[in-house]
Amino acid sequence: MARPVVGIVGNTSLLNDQYPIHAAGTMNTIAVAQVSGCLPLIIPSDPSLVSVEELLETCDGFLLTGGRPNVHPEEYGEPATEAHGTFDRARDAIALGLVRACVERGQPFFGVCRGFQEVNVAMGGTLYPEIRELPGRMNHRMPPDGTMEQKFELRHDVTFTQGGVFHEVLGAPKVRTNTLHGQGIKAAGPRVVIDGFAEDGTPEAIYIKDAPGFTLAVQWHPEWDAGNDPVSRPLFERFGAAAQAWADSKHQRMLKSA
């Protein structure tokens, strides 16, 4: 049987500083293929090339990846400032509508870093432009120097709601994670449940209340060493199971209509 298809929401970039590409990190495709057990499909996040409707019909689930550009603050009713950094309005146009459609349909998605922030904004929430400038907050940004292992090293704890969704999935009330983000949740959307916090109070794990499908999102990067990390692996395994369930139900619907 064919593997479920997971659309990996990509980012626009420049290869060799001049050749425009749509790209997704290798660690994302490895996590989806080897841990979730799904077929990874990189999505060009541009509404002039693809539509949300086409993506929903083509894919069984979606990985909302991290990315350097931030969600434009106009998407949550605030003006852009220098602190908000760079933007990708084409990705905004695809990802935010995709999140809302998946919530409505029960189609699974897994949000990571920028994807975590997209989920909150899509559901009516807002973001802080720079977490490290808030009183009492730590610097959550990626270390500017060092090896990849050093950049993705585990740097802080995340504590989950006792008996909550993440506690159940991970089998622990507290885990150690990496941290490579500048922005973070300011106000959660009306249906966004913050289910885990860093030790400085920064929201790190969310899901959508009363959604019929898998809607988990995390502020850290579980795709790093996902096959070996005891926190990352169950998240991608559970996401893969949700994508498989969606693919199975889609197959059953096609058989009934044949």
Image (cartoon, helix red, strand yellow):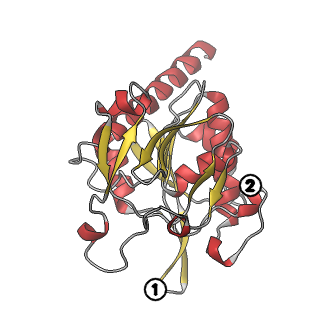
Residue 78 is left or right of residue 159, and the answer is right
Where residue 99 appears, as percent x and y from the top left, is: 63, 42
Where 108 falls versus 221 (above or below)?
above
Where residue 160 appears, as percent x and y from the top left, is: 40, 37
- Residue neighbourhood size for the residue with mark 1, other residues' Cα within 10 Å, grouped as few (<14), some (14–19), many (≥20): few
- Counting residues from the N terminus, which is met first, the one under dot 2 or under dot 1? 1
Disc 2 versus disc 1: distance between alpha carbons? Answer: 34 Å
Determine which quarter of the picture holds residue 258: top right
Residue at the location (38% across, 60% down)? Answer: 179
Q: Who is closer to the viewer here, 168 or 91?
A: 168
Q: Amino acid at mark 2?
A: Tyr
- The answer to whether residue 86 is visible is no
Residue 111 is left or right of residue 119, and the answer is left
Q: Residue furthest left?
A: 228
Determine which quarter of the picture holds residue 169: top left
Residue at the location (30% across, 44% down)? Answer: 175
For mark 1, give the secondary structure: loop
Residue at the location (58% across, 21% down)? Answer: 254
Q: Amino acid at mark 1?
A: Asn
For mark 2, give the secondary structure: helix
Q: Residue furthest front?
A: 135
Name the residue that disc number 1 marks: 16
Name the residue that disc number 2 marks: 76
Q: Who is closer to the viewer here, 26 or 208?
A: 208
